[in-house]
Image (cartoon, rainbow, N blue to C red):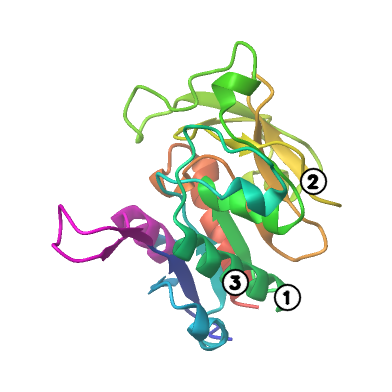
């Protein structure tokens, strides 16, 4: 492993022709990369080439599975119906699944952010709420109306979890919120590490791995001091 500056793979979003280019294009918000850089890592964007997954895993020391304006195909967690709001990006999901599953099999540190957390939960055997307003009574506006670089609500951090050890002696964190889906049932042995005031699961982890962490918010925006610590811990583990 590269002890000084580990290489952190970051999954890209993908878009159809239009806007930036008349041809299909990849996208990555800058602060995903800058958060990795600030924590001491080297960000490496990952194109959706499933056949290259073993080679890409050989090149990186840790993985960030990013979010995006799309959803995990409900069939992947055994749902027989698909909510009208669900939009999928099947090639991206297939690639991210292969990367995350391969990274975990190597016990490589993996951080799932927003939709990345949701996919991580499904990979670990869990399921998702397909549309929060239809499933959670009196829910918070998890697609917050204010800008994403501001807090939308707080989450309570459960003690004796990896997240609690990372963020320090705090009982809650202020977080941003940009999702309409969430973790429903967690997979076997998966631990819930944080919850919103309305009961929506905001973070998961798996103790069988040295760093398998998912958060429903976007810590790359550094809303609280805990957000930077999440990336610091990722880089620390990637150095090992």
Q: CA distance from mark 3 to mark 2?
A: 22 Å
N-term-proximal mark, 3 vs 2: 3
Pair 3/2: label in front: 3
27 above or below 222?
Answer: below
Residue 185 is situated, as x and y percent measured from the top left of the image, at: 76, 39
Q: Which residue is mark 2?
A: 191
Looking at this rendering, what residue extends furthest in the front direction?
80
Residue found at the very far right of the displayed protein: 189
Label 3's element? helix
Span shown in magenta: 13-37
Q: Position of residue 27 (x, y in %)?
A: 30, 60
Question: Dot 2, how many residues are within 10 Å of its Cα: few (below 14), some (14-19), or many (20+)?
Answer: some
Which disc number belongs to residue 105?
Answer: 1
State which quarter of the image contains the N terminus.
bottom right
| Nearer the observer, 240 or 86 | 86
**How many residues crowd around disc 3 within 10 Å: few (fewer than 14), some, or many (20 or more)?**
some
Q: Nearer the viewer, mark 2 or mark 1?
A: 1
The percent position of residue 93, horizontal first and vertical second, equals 52, 60
Q: Residue at point 59% right, 35% down?
A: 130
- Can see residue 31? yes
**C-alpha gap between disc 2 and disc 1:** 18 Å
Q: Is residue 25 magenta?
A: yes
Kindly tell me whether residue 40 is visible in this rendering: no
Marker count (numbered): 3
Figure check: 108 above or below 166: below
Which element carries disc 2, helix, strand or loop?
A: strand
Q: Which residue is mark 3?
A: 98
Mark 3 or 1, nearer chain start: 3
Q: At numbered mark 1, what does the secondary structure look like: helix, strand or loop?
A: helix
Whole-percent x, y for residue 221 in the image: 39, 44
Left or right of 78: which side holds 216?
left
Residue situated in front as seen by the camera: 233 or 209: 209
């Amino acid at each position: 492993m590269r002890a000084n500056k580990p290489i952190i793979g970051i999954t890209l979003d993908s878009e159809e022709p239009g806007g930036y280019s008349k041809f299909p294009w990849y996208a990555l918000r800058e602060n995903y990369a800058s958060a990795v850089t600030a924590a001491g890592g080297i960000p490496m964007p990952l194109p959706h080439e499933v056949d290259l997954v073993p080679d890409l895993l050989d090149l990186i020391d840790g993985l960030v599975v990013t979010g995006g304006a799309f959803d995990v195909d409900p069939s992947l967690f055994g749902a027989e119906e698909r909510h009208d709001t669900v939009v999928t990006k099947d090639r991206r999901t297939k690639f991210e699944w292969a990367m995350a599953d391969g990274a975990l099999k190597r016990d490589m540190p993996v951080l799932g952010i927003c939709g990345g957390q949701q996919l991580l939960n499904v990979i670990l055997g869990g399921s998702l709420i397909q549309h929060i307003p239809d499933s959670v009574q009196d829910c918070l506006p998890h697609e917050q109306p204010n800008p994403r670089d501001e807090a939308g609500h707080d989450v309570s951090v459960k003690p004796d979890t990896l997240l609690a050890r990372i963020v320090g002696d705090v009982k809650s964190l202020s977080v941003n919120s940009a999702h309409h889906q969430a973790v429903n049932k967690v997979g076997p042995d998966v631990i819930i590490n944080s919850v919103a005031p309305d009961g929506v699961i905001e973070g998961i982890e798996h103790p069988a791995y040295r760093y398998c962490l998912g958060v429903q918010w976007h810590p790359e925006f550094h809303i609280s001091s805990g957000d930077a610590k999440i990336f610091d811990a990722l880089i620390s583990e990637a150095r090992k």
